[in-house]
Image (tube, helix red, strand yellow):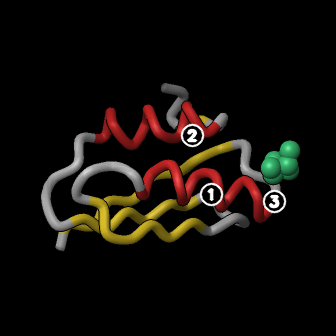
Amino acid sequence: MIESTYTVTGMTCGHCVRSVTEGISTIDGVDEVDVDLATGRVIVTAHHPVPDDEVHAAVIAAGYEFADGR
Ligand code: 9UX
């Protein structure tokens, strides 16, 4: 398993968490998405490498952003 951690900004409620979780979950290879609302930390567990750009695109599509300003 490959675990990657990201920090997402803009999530303020449980619905935000669900949107981000569902968006990232649709990416090929992703098995588990764990989002911590308080910190914005998102842990993605996958069974093959997932490009960061794909995770980024899913986050943007859900209406949020990476904390690194991308
Ligand atoms: Mo979480 Mo609601 O943003 O607009 S507060 S979905």
Q: Residue at x 32, y 60 (%)?
A: 4
Residue nearest the viewer, comparing 16 with 39: 16
Q: Secondary structure under badge 1?
A: loop
Residue position marked by numbered label 2 in the rendering:
67
Q: Residue at x 72, y 53 (%)?
A: 16
From the image, state whether disc 2 or disc 3 is nearer to you. 3
Q: Provide residue 24's location: percent of width, then percent of height.
A: 44, 51
Q: Secondary structure under badge 2?
A: loop
Q: Residue at x 53, y 56 (%)?
A: 22
User: At label 1, which amino acid type do we have?
Assistant: Gly
Going from N to C along the chain, the mark reached first, 1 or 3, is: 3
Going from N to C along the chain, the mark reached first, 2 or 3, is: 3
User: Is 36 on the left or on the right of 50, as rendered?
Assistant: right
User: At label 2, which amino acid type do we have?
Assistant: Ala
Q: Quadrant of the N terminus?
A: bottom left
Q: Residue at x 30, y 40 (%)?
A: 52
Numbered circle sitting on residue 40: 1
Q: Secondary structure under badge 3?
A: loop
Distance, label 2 to label 3, CA atoms, is 17 Å
Relative to residue 19, is residue 30 depicted above or below?
below
